[in-house]
């Protein structure tokens, strides 16, 4: 049995703590989370943050397994010291340009419309739908990358919508009808990236509970007020990841290779600084710790890069369906979102040119204290960069407690697709 088969089965935690590991281009973030499975709650008992070495990660992808493993080890040890506990099971998040997520809708015509839908038939339909979705994503990735036989694996899946002869239902069992249409969100990642994550987990003597697409985790971990439509933008060191929640369902995730490091490198080039010096100046610029004259100069330096970044947002959102309006609510997270000027540029609305956005953008930072089911007991996870590891913890607790009708079917379909 492959490591992927092990990951996707129904799991129970050992002890009462799990580790969440956000392996980013710029930082590794580790949390020790005490889990209350019966109440679907988690408490953060310890946190560790460690800078990545140059070129160990590029645009969200691991390029030096041993180097990244060593950085992860330092972050984990810091989290364990603070928590006073050790976790042997982990959920690890991945993101970047080759992590793909989309909602696939397929219609299945039943042979006997008078026959009531029963569990074996539904399982068979979902399995067929997942294979069709898998073949489509492989075709899309091949067209994008130019590699005809790129190996991808399904890492996350959730049912978005079910209709029988055009009527929406939440549980199709017992209904009659000719056509059943199921929409399912799937997130995929290349086998190469998943293999690197597995190697890191082995080097750290960790048992993987789940590998999760980080934009998917963020979208599931935030409770949207007054409706379920939103755009989530996670700006990391090497990439910007976008998740679209529309009409109550997660429609897809997109990514492009432009994040906080690009702005730091711009300062390196324009001010003849080394990377560490430029990073410190960038942080002081964003926190208002520099003089007005220097602030104005840096603002001019970043002006064009912010325009390029906005065009990336536009292009990513342009890949989604234009049949329905895009949400006006935009939620930001990730260390790169703290850059002064990013939020203001989004609020100006130029990124929405040519897109079906009907209202002026309403841009807010995700509040780390409002992540579903997670309480920060250490009291210092208050910044945009803290959202992703907290979201991974929230998703893990949701998945550990996930039962219902479709959860076991999706897990079964995933296992069958990994053999």
Image: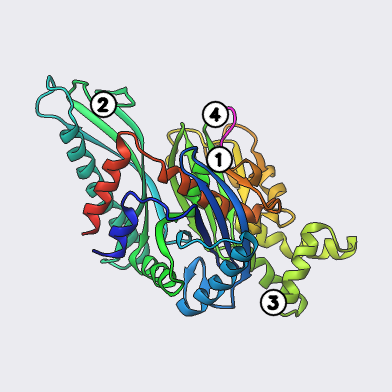
Residue sitting nearer the eye, 383 or 63: 383
Cα–Cα gap, marks 2 and 1: 28 Å
Q: Residue shown at 17%/40% (left/top)?
A: 124
> Where, quadrant-wise, is the C terminus in this rendering?
bottom left
- Label 1 secondary element: loop
Principal secondary structure, stretch drawn in magenta? loop
Residue to which mark 4 is pinned: 227
Q: How was the colour assigned to the protein in this rendering?
A: rainbow
Of callouts 2 and 3, which one flags the residue occurring earlier in the amino acid sequence? 2
Q: Earlier in the sequence, mark 2 or mark 1?
A: 2
What range of the chain is rendered magenta? 222-226
In the depicted structure, whether residue 9 falls above or below residue 280: above
Which x, y percent locates residue 287? 80, 58
Residue occupied by mark 3: 275
Compute the Cα span from label 1 to label 4.
Answer: 16 Å
In the image, farthest residue toward the left: 111
């Amino acid at each position: 049995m492959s490591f992927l088969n092990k990951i996707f089965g129904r799991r129970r935690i050992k002890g009462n703590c799990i580790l969440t590991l956000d392996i980013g281009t710029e930082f590794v973030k580790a949390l020790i989370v005490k889990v209350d499975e019966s109440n679907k709650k988690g408490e953060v008992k310890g946190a560790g943050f460690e800078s990545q070495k140059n070129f160990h990660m590029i645009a969200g992808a691991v390029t030096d397994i041993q180097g990244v493993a060593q950085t992860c080890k330092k972050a984990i040890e810091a989290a364990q010291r603070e928590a006073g506990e050790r976790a042997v099971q982990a959920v690890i998040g991945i993101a970047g340009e080759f992590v793909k997520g989309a909602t696939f809708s397929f219609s299945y015509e039943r042979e006997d419309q008078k026959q009531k839908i029963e569990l074996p038939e539904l399982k068979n339909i979902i399995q067929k739908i997942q294979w069709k979705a898998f073949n489509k994503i492989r075709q899309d990735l091949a067209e994008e990358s130019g590699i005809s036989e790129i190996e991808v694996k399904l890492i996350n899946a959730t049912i978005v919508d079910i209709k029988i002869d055009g009527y929406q239902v939440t549980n199709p069992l017992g209904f009659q009808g000719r056509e059943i249409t199921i929409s399912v969100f799937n997130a995929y990642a290349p086998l190469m990236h998943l293999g690197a994550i597995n190697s890191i987990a082995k080097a750290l003597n960790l048992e993987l509970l789940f590998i999760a697409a980080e934009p998917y985790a963020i979208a599931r971990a935030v409770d949207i007020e007054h409706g379920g439509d939103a755009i989530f933008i996670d700006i990391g060191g090497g990439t910007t990841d976008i998740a679209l929640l529309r009409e109550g369902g997660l429609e897809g995730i997109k990514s492009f290779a432009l994040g906080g490091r690009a702005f730091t490198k711009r300062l390196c080039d324009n001010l003849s600084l080394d990377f560490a010096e430029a990073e410190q100046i960038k942080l002081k610029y964003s926190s208002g710790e520099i003089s007005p004259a220097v602030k104005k100069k840096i603002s001019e330096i970043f002006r064009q890069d912010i325009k390029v970044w906005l065009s990336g947002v536009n292009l990513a959102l342009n890949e989604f369906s234009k049949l329905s309006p895009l949400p006006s609510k935009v939620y930001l997270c990730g260390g790169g979102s703290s850059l002064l000027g990013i939020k203001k540029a989004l609020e100006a609305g130029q990124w929405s040119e040519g897109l079906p956005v009907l209202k002026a953008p309403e841009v807010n930072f995700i509040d780390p204290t409002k992540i579903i089911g997670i309480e920060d007991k250490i009291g210092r996870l208050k910044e945009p960069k803290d959202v992703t590891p907290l979201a991974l913890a929230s998703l893990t607790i949701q998945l550990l407690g996930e039962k219902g009708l479709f959860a076991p079917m999706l897990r079964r379909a995933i296992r069958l697709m990994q053999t």
